[in-house]
Amino acid sequence: MTLIKNLDTPTLKTLYLSDLEKGQTAIMTGFDTSKCPDQNFAKDLKERLMEMGFEENRRIEVFEKGLFFGDPIAVRIGHMTIAMRKADARAVTIKLGASCLHES
Amino acid sequence: MNHNSPINHNEELKSSSSNGFKVALVGAPNCGKSSLFNALTGSRQKVANYPGVTVERRSGIYKTEHDSEITLIDLPGLYSMNDRSLDEKISRQVIMGEHETESRPDLILCVLDSTNIRVQLRLALELKTLRLPMVIVLNMADIAKRDKIEIDTQKLALDLGLKVITTTAVRRSGLASLRDVLDHDVSSIKAEKLNIPQKTSFKDIAELQKCAKKIAACAIISEGHYHKATKAIDKILLHPVLGLVIFLSLMVFMFQSVFSWSSVPMDIIEKGFALLAQGITAITPDNWLRSLLNDGMIAGVGSVLIFLPQIVILFTFILILESTGYMARAAFLMDKLMGSVGLNGRAFIPLLSSFACAIPGIMAARTIASNRDRLITIMIAPLMACSARMPVYTLLIAAFIPDQEVWGYFNLKGLVLLALFLTGIVFALIVAFIMKLTISKETAKPFLMELPKYQLPLLKNILLGLWERTKAFLRRAGTIILGTNVALWVLALYPTAPEGSSDPDINHSIIGIMGKAIQPIFEPLGFTWEICIALIPGMAAREVAVGALGTVYALQGDEDQVANSLEVMISQSWSLPTAFAFLAWYIFAPQCFATLATARRETNSWAWTGFMTFYLFALAYLSAWGVNVVTTHIIG
């Protein structure tokens, strides 16, 4: 709910893939690995995500969430579905675009 | 590592066909590479390990229409060539000609999933910098067509400067273009090899990504839509509640089937071995040779081969779940549970396999990227109640647990069996948790897992997978188990009882002496010396203890007692605390040489194998002791 509100009054608060609710779609804006446990992990995570097609301006949908604490999440990007943990999804920044609301 | 030197110094040492033509299949996981490999090589394939590491080497022979042979190697699936995992490293070494035992391939078939070339082109571009002849294979063309994905292959070929063909691995007709390349273009490729354009390299990942994006944008005519069936099925199978219910029902059904469907073939195998033993008795004189064949070889190998039906049924399930794409969903559903003890969803599959047999389970742990997670999974795999424990569990349950209904619904025997399974699982989780806290810190690895599109399983792939596993199991029965059984047969027979002694020979044999010698150690657990004698051959393989108990008791009593079944014999001569302690011991004790040998090979460490042996024996001893003391106390 709060996320939808952000659409009308854009704020500077960064949104992360981990913020999305089940069924929501967003546009990827980049990576933010500052919350990763260490630098090696951050580098590894970013590289792996890029290999799996995480790129700026691509549409991302949170397709499903796990039963407990909504973790892990299943994310759809392009023609791939990827299972990942919420903590790792925190490394992907997104924005909600008007187009997102019409899709899915 | 010097990435620019294709020259290898020990070219002569390298195995494989130096005069033949060698083709490597490279591609991302789930691109249908292995189906392609199976379709091209059929049963002419071999699975081994690269020396010293646990990366599988799959090779096979493709017969061209002119009857010449081409060696195909199926390199492990990878998303990039970063040397991050062992798979990636070996693949890169092989492709670059830096591998010690594998010679450099003459041609790379770069297999891309047609429905996902946008992402996978990256790998193709990376491979292109290696200056090897390469053909791009756009696989799963049928699915792409159905999903309305259109690719301009000519444009793609032009932009990449490579030949591009489309295939559908699941259909014979879908391979025509690839067969054509292998049948006709090989000689021209060989000639071409000499004038490959200069190596182009990429500054960094970003540049590579940009280039891939540009090519994809030009070549993709229509993006199509996401696989509709997968989307619909995932709505149900990944559902937080419904998905878990379906998953758990599937597991119950699977285990039910493993035990119920196997009873008939197991009977047949048992009868077959009995007939074989009778036949030998009929044609051999009553001497040591007959005893060696019957008691040493047939009884030993038979007691292991009897589990073949269970293993085949379990693996049929696992292979079907894997090839349909469901296994990744199971890992998704189980990730939270595994995560609570510090592992991730991927560890679930090896642990599941371990319920049939810890050996394939330990081997399946290779799919876990993090070394630490992989090690922990290997360490706890033997706690999953494997099928070799079943004879011991069922024997003791039959002897001591009354056939009684509980809460009007469940059978007490069944509940005890379930409790034995669950105890193993609970302790596995506890051990994993403790190990995660104590093992030296390794950088954690993110848990990212592709959930592939659902596919119908291909009978051919299932059968090939089954055959491979069955072969591994039979080899184990034919070597380690046969060997130890013959050795134990000798130790159980010699020296023989002195003349005039009424004791059975086994009491005077080396094993009898050893059993009596270790009895004081097992006294606190309530184990009798008969149990101790049976435990010694049971160290090699758990189920052998049942046969050994039979030997000890059968030889000991008078004829009436011999006629009694082992079950009755045990229920009369063992106390309840002893029986329970023995069951507790069996949950933990690592009584399987083959498992320990596999753990040694897969961890490449004697220290970890030693640790596994020690902690399991320690748990076995302590829990059996505890159970004995508590039960004795309760029944007073």
Image: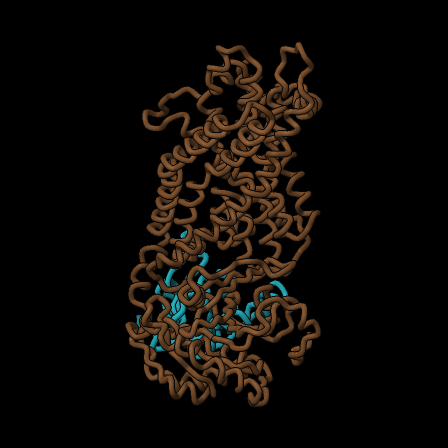
| Above or below, B142 relative to B264 | below
Left or right: residue B607 compared with residue B59: right
Choose between B193 and B119: the one closer to the eye.
B193
- Judge from the rendering whether residue B362 lies leftward or rightward of residue B112; answer left or right: right
Q: In which quarter of the image is residue B80?
A: bottom right
- Residue B610 in picture, x, y percent from top left: 68, 43
Q: Where is residue B13 in the image (x, y as percent from the top left)?
A: 67, 68
Q: What percent of the width, then of the height, locates residue B49?
A: 58, 58
Q: Is residue B202 positioned above or below B138 on the image? A: below
User: Is residue B86 or residue B564 the one in the foreground?
Assistant: B564
Question: For the C terminus of chain B, which image quadrant?
Answer: top right
In the image, B102: left or right of A11? right
Number of numbered labels in the structure image = 0
Can residue A7 be seen at all in this image of the molecule? no
Q: Can residue B402 be seen in this view?
A: yes
Q: Where's the N terminus of chain B, which quadrant?
A: bottom right
Task: Name the residue: 47% across, 72% down.
Answer: B68
Picture coordinates of residue A7, whole percent (x, y): 38, 75
Q: Chain A is shown in which shade?
A: cyan
